[in-house]
Image (cartoon, grey):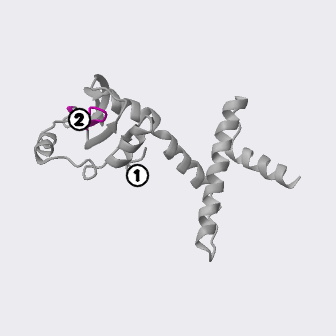
Amino acid sequence: MDRFYTTLSTVSNLTQKGFEVLAAITKNRAKLSYKIENEIAELQKGESKFFCSTNNKLLLTVWSDSKIVYLISNIGTSSVSEVSRNCKQRETFLPYEKNIVNCPNTIKDYSKSARGVDYLDQIMSYYSTASRSKKWYMSIVCHMLEMCLHNSFVLYCKAKNTKLSYLGFRKSVIESLFS
């Protein structure tokens, strides 16, 4: 879930309804105490902290990388593994050096699955219809149709196991609508 939509009440409600949630959350929506905020402020790069809710159903993972990352989950664990990160070198001419840092597994799981929305936005920007209308709802309807077309493209490629381009898929859908 995108951090723009994530709140503690949203995650709690989804947990009660039986959904698994692994979401980024902003610092102000996490509702942290001053004591916890001070602990987080002292984190060095590669360090992490884990905080459990009072009912032990939600886990807040805080990891310090180039900036502090907050994740909330009802399926995560507090396990940590090593990852390779690029760090700038100061005294050599090489631009980056590989360093091994500890990373929570919830961060790795989130990074694996967070690419879908970014990919959707990227593909939709390439072939945007961007209709202008005096009616505000028409642009929303067009955007929803674009999303449906993209989702059907992803499902089609998985079902048929083909490497069809998105533009080719759009052309074939339009041809089939007019024939």
Q: x, y (%) of residue 82?
A: 29, 22
Mark 2 Cα within 10 Å, few/some/many (few <14, many 20+)? few
With respect to residue 45, does 38 lie above or below? below
Q: Which residue is mark 1?
A: 5
Near-viewer residue (13 or 161): 13
Q: x, y (%) of residue 158?
A: 66, 31
In the orientation shown, which residue stands out farthest toward the right?
179
As measured in the structure, the alpha-carbon distance from the residue carrying label 2 to the one carrying label 1 is 37 Å
- Please tell me whether mark 1 sits on a helix, a strand or a loop: loop
Query: Residue at 38% across / 41% down in the picture?
Result: 23
Q: x, y (%) of residue 72?
A: 32, 39
Q: Which amino acid, by three-letter code, is at mark 1?
A: Tyr
**Which of the two discs, 2 and 1, labels the residue nearer the N terminus?**
1
Residue 54 within the segment the image draws in magenta: yes
Q: Quadrant of residue 128?
A: bottom right
Near-viewer residue (89 or 76): 76
Q: Which mark is residue 89?
A: 2
Q: Main secondary structure of the magenta part?
A: strand
Front position among marks 2 and 1:
1
Magenta residue span: 47-64
Query: Residue at 60% across / 68% down in the picture?
Result: 137
Q: Is residue 136 shown left or right of residue 167?
A: left
| Quadrant showing the N terminus | top left
Q: Which amino acid, by three-letter code, is at mark 2?
A: Gln
Residue 134 within the segment the image draws in magenta: no
